[in-house]
Image (cartoon, rainbow, N blue to C red):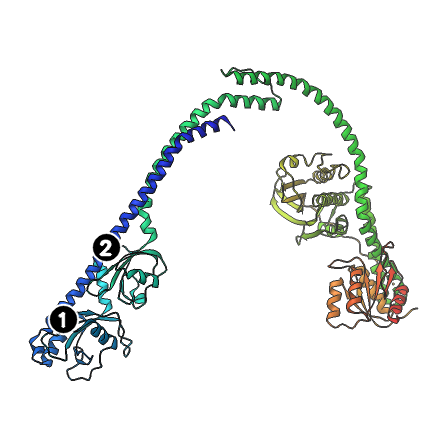
Amino acid sequence: MRIRTRLLLLSLAVLLPAIVAAALGIGFVYAEERGINQRNLQETSRAMALAVDRELGTREILLKALASAPSLARGDLATFHEHARVIAEEREASILLSDENGRVLLNSRLPVGTALPALLPTAVQERRDAGPDVTIVSNLYRLPRNPDVPPSFALQVPVPHTARPHLYLAMTTPASQLQALFEQQRLPSDWHATIVDRQGVVVARSSDPAKFVGTHVRPELQDSMAAGEGMHPGMTLAGVASTAFFSRVPRSNWSFLVSVPDAELRRTGLWASALLGGMSLLLLALATLAALAVARRTAQPMEDLRHDAQQLGDGAPVQARSSGLLEVDAVNEALVGASERLRRASADLEHRVAEAVASFEQSQRALLQAQKLEALGRLTGGIAHDFNNVLQTLTTGLHAARLGSDDKVRRLLATCERAVTRGSELARQLMVFGRVQEVRVETFDLAQRLREVQPLLTGALPTDITFTQDVTPGLWPVTADPLQLELALLNLVMNARDAMPHGGRLRLRAGNSVGQSPAQDLPPGDYVAISLQDEGEGMNEEVLARALDPFFTTKSVGRGSGLGLPQAYGFARQSGGALVLRSQVGEGTTVTLVLPRAQVAPQEPAPAAPSGGLRGAGCVLLVEDDPLVRDTVRSGLEVSGFEVQTANDADEALRMLAGGHCVDVVLTDVVMPGSMNGVDLARLLAREHPRLRVVIATGYSDRSIDMPGVRTLAKPYALHQAVAALNEAMAG
């Protein structure tokens, strides 16, 4: 632990009691403010309950005065009805006169003498439970015979000086008239005031009355309201976490609730606590800054020692200094002595390193040939396969030419000539790998050259690396040595292969760059960019800075010579272009060859000159990915009497068989793209189509294929050999 840290911890230990005291004070202030808020809200609910009681009392006084009217005492219901109608319209209410059995004698809204329905049974029962001489306030109700009438409540008083049966005067009022109480109190917008009757039904509410009037409050809140006055934490009907403060309305035994969101309750306490906490943190920060200043001055001699140690590590001389601390000065003296000894040892080490570098360069030259041999071994299988396809095309085409008509002979001979051209290209690519060629600069179609070199590039890759090529239509021609271009691309592909030991994707893209400068040292103009992007490990900045140095490599001994990227860089510079290298650790590497656009059109190749028994019968499904072999073999078999259907790979062949194509025998190649090769296809057909015969044509003489019912045909084969093998397979 550093001295500065120790001093800072010491300061914190001194301040810790003050921090604890401040935290306790903050907690006390928060609790006190919360208690004050709760008491104030309880008083608010009590005052609002009394306001509701006064509103009901006003209606009671009015009813009692009306019940003492002389017209009612002498039984003049017509005069009393007119008096009651005027009062009821002023109050937007209804006044009813009924006896103790609930029979309605008068309704201010209907003419005298109209047949009137009886009171609700609940109103009659409430009167019987309360007694004949008590004013009662009903719960909220709706008229079952008229559901369009809004929810209402009734206040009922006895009529004095009447003999039995007793008469009662009631005023039914819409509950919406109580909403004015909320507007008079001007409660905060996020508070919710609610009037609840004795059954827990909402009579009036300050917000959303149309939605909540007539609904029941939550059961747990109704249980709490049985105490008459108090508070209840929970959820409002709208689903907001709040605390409800309630108080009993004396005249009606209703309850008045004020629901305040919990966040609002905590706000004042939190504000006071935040103020006190901020002051405490400010004092703590000032004390910490003071402690850091003292620690910095105390730790400066130790920082000087660290600087001396860094100078020693960098090989720079260490200066002697005096700090006033005996221990620090002793360490500084030891570092000065070590610096002198290290400088003497460094000179000796440089001499030894020079000798080691010379020996290493000699070893690298020896490894160059080993790298070529190792890459040649990886390419042998793919090139041998392509040569066998060329020979197969020639062999089958020439045999079929003997049996065909003049037009078919000419087409077959043209195919054979294309196969010869392809064989010469394969030989030229082998010369490229061996660097046995002369410098030959020419203007050529770059898109066509990239298509031709693709088999060479894919042959250098293992099966777990996917190679894709994307060439922009209308790609410009370039003027360069085509063999050097292919060698550069091959080197870049092999570098990408070694960077992806566990497989991945390698993308080749080629496109035009109009009027730009793709590289820093190139003038603006028209260029063609060929980029190879891998998903390998990538390079850090140190490796990226030296990647183009000859003989620099990060591969293990025997895995590389460090000449791949330098060769590609030299080719690009000799062609008037540049090489752009971008890489990031974990995200792969992108190498871009930038070549100038050719100023002349590429030379068109000279057109090819026109070219010129065993029988079979049955339907043959030919599975071959090479178009030259596929077209030639198909023509030869058709000339020999077979009906031939073709498929590019095993997946397409399986789809054709599943689609109901009539096939007697399958002739398939071994090496094909797709999810399975020819051997896998033969095994699958043996399981799913046991009556279907299979003939496998292979160019690998060392591959053993021992499957019941499957015949093999070595490539290149003659047409009569293919006809014989197919006939024997169908006969078997």
Between residues 95 and 652, which one lies in front from this camera angle? 95
Secondary element type, mark 1 = helix
- What numbered label is drawn on residue 331? none
Classify residue 433 by image quadrant.
top right
Taking the spot 22% from the left edge, 60% from the top edge, the residue there is 49
Residue 44's disc is 2
Question: The residue under label 2 is which amino acid type?
Answer: Thr
In the rendered structure, are the residues bearing label 1 and label 2 in contact, judged by CB atoms less than 8 Å apart? no
Residue 210 percent location from the top left of the image = 30, 67
Q: Position of residue 542 (x, y in %)?
A: 64, 34
Give neighbour class at mark 1: few <14, some 14-19, many 20+ (Cα, 10 Å).
many
- List the single residue furthest toward the right: 613
Q: Position of residue 585 (x, y in %)?
A: 63, 41
Is residue 538 in sight in this rendering? Answer: yes
Q: As rendered, which of 732 and 100 lies closer to the eye?
A: 100
* Residue underneath mark 1: 63
Secondary structure of the residue carrying numbered label 2: helix
Q: Label 2 neighbourhood size at 10 Å, few (<14), some (14-19), many (20+)?
A: many
Gap between marks 1 and 2 measured at Cα: 29 Å
Give percent across and percent down for residue 140: 26, 70
As displayed, is residue 619 above or below residue 335? below
Is 242 left or right of 554, judged from the image as shown? Answer: left
Q: In which quadrant is the C terminus drawn?
A: bottom right
Q: Earlier in the sequence, mark 1 or mark 2?
A: 2
